[in-house]
Structure formats: structure tokens, C-alpha cells
Image: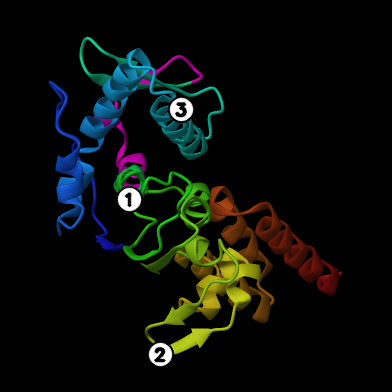
Amino acid sequence: MHFFFKAHRKVELYNVNSVTPGNQFTNLLNEPDSDSFAAQFKQYLVNKKVYEAFDSMNAKTDNVNQNKVFFSALTDILRNVFEDRELELEFVQESFEFYIRLGDGRSITFNELSEGFSAFISILMDLLLRVDIIRKSKGDFTFDPPGVVLIDEPETHFHIAMQYEVLPMLTNLFPNIQFIVATHSPAVISSIKNAVVFDISSQKEIAGWQAGSSYSELMVNHFGLENEFSPVADDILLKVNNAVQHNDKAGLVQILTENEKYLTPSLKFEIENQIIALESKRA
């Protein structure tokens, strides 16, 4: 299996009105358009639910069990993505629709996901379909297909906490797939051990230290920023240093007064200490 996921990916799932032949998904495996393939995800789920019901009526217990395992695994994945252990995936047969029922009582469909969740779920949907189809074709539902998957900016639309979870989740779910990702996120490159990190700018490989680094250290040593502070903090620090060099207590007080709401507790404490130190010199 070889595939590429582009950076901007919000998949609109096709509406489902009936069951379709199972071989249509096998024929789509080699399609170059990932959005087209992943858009069939809801149709695939509907098919599995309907086939599960038929297999149950025909006493094909092995097939029923495999479908149940698939939906149980999908529910666990969604619980991890949403960080909600009470989440349930519900199928409403009258509308051929799947609802994600959250622990707080909210209910959403796959098409109603936010940009962040949709971006990540689109990758999961695609890979889950492909792996399940390959397993079915081999008649071995324990098989973990090997492959190479390229992902451009997996952090797209994600908050920082979830950026740390993307690669660990994918590598755990698909252990025989090699993931090659292009990223600008310190959270992504520090989220997993045994990863090879290659700096395209310097054309050099980083020898594993990124996994034990802080976010700010990566921003400076890998992404090339001058320091870990914001431009606003840099400007304040420059003014503080200038005032200290000129023994300008009034200037420090002015900096503290004008910028108080922008100061972290530690920076505010440092400025106050400098003011006290200048007062001691004059005493």
C-alpha cells in the first residue's frame, strides 16, 4: 500500500441511500484521488452494518464477529480522537446515517466535524478502509498490511495537545506502515521515539534528540527562531535590558505599568527585582 495525503483535506462524505456491491471498494483501492476514496467511508460503514445483519440472519457467526470487531475498534479510535471514553457510534437505519454520540449529550455526524477533526479523521477513514479491504481479500483479519504513507502537515487545524497524538495513534493502529510526514510542528516531530527527522533546510538528519526536547528548544534549535519568546516579549525584554544598563528605575516602572497585562509571572517578577536592585544601589 502506497499513498499520499495532502495538507488541506476536509472530506465531504457521500450521502447513502442503499447498499452497494462490496467489490466497488476493492476497485477503488488504486484510485489516485484519496478524497474520492475516503468520501465513500459512510457507504462502507452502511454496507458493513447491513451485511452484519444478513450474516446474523444466515448464522454466519465469523462474519458477524469480524464486523463487530471492526465497529468496536472504530469506536475506540473515535474515543481516543475526541478524548471521550463515553462516546458511542450509533447507526440509524431509517436514514442510513451514523451519529457520534458524545458523553456530554451532543450528537454529530461525520460531515459535521470541525476542520481539525475532519482533517485527521479523513486520514483514518482512508487507511481503515484500505486495511479492512486488504484483510478481507486475504481472509485474515489479523493481518497488518505493510506500506508507505506520505502525509503533508498532519498538524493541519489541530490544537497543540492533539498534534502530540497524531503520529503515536497512527503508528499504533498501523504498525507495518512507514509514515513519511512533512511538518512545521515541534509537537509532531517530538511526539514519537525511533523516528528519523530530516531537516530539509540543512539537508541533515537529526539523531533522535527531538523526542526528548522541549517545545521552545525545538523552535530555536530546529526551526531556526532566535529564541523561544514571542516578538512582543522580545520587545519588552529589549526595553528592560536598556533601562537596566542605564540605571533607569523610572523606565523600568513605566515598562511594568504599560505592559503588565502582557507579562508572565516570571517576567513580571524579574522586572520588579530589577527595580528593587536599582533602589538598593541608590540607597
Assess whether residue 266 is covered by the magenta stretch.
no
Q: Which residue is mark 3?
A: 65
Q: Which residue is mark 1?
A: 134
User: What residue span does the magenta drawing correspond to?
Assistant: 103-120
Image position, residue 188 (x, y; %)? 48, 62
Label 2 crowding class (10 Å Cα cut-off): few <14, some 14-19, many 20+?
Answer: few
Give left or right: position of 136 versus 80.
left
Q: If you read the primary sequence from the N terminus, does the residue marked by circle 2 or circle 1 appear first?
A: 1
Image position, residue 143 (x, y; %)? 45, 52
Secondary structure found at label 3: helix
Give left or right: position of 182 versus 84.
left
77 lies above or below 274: above
Three-letter amino acid code of the residue under disc 2:
Gln
Q: Which residue is mark 2?
A: 203
The residue under the point 51% across, 19% down is 103
The residue under the point 67% across, 75% down is 244
**Residue 68 appears in the rendering:** yes
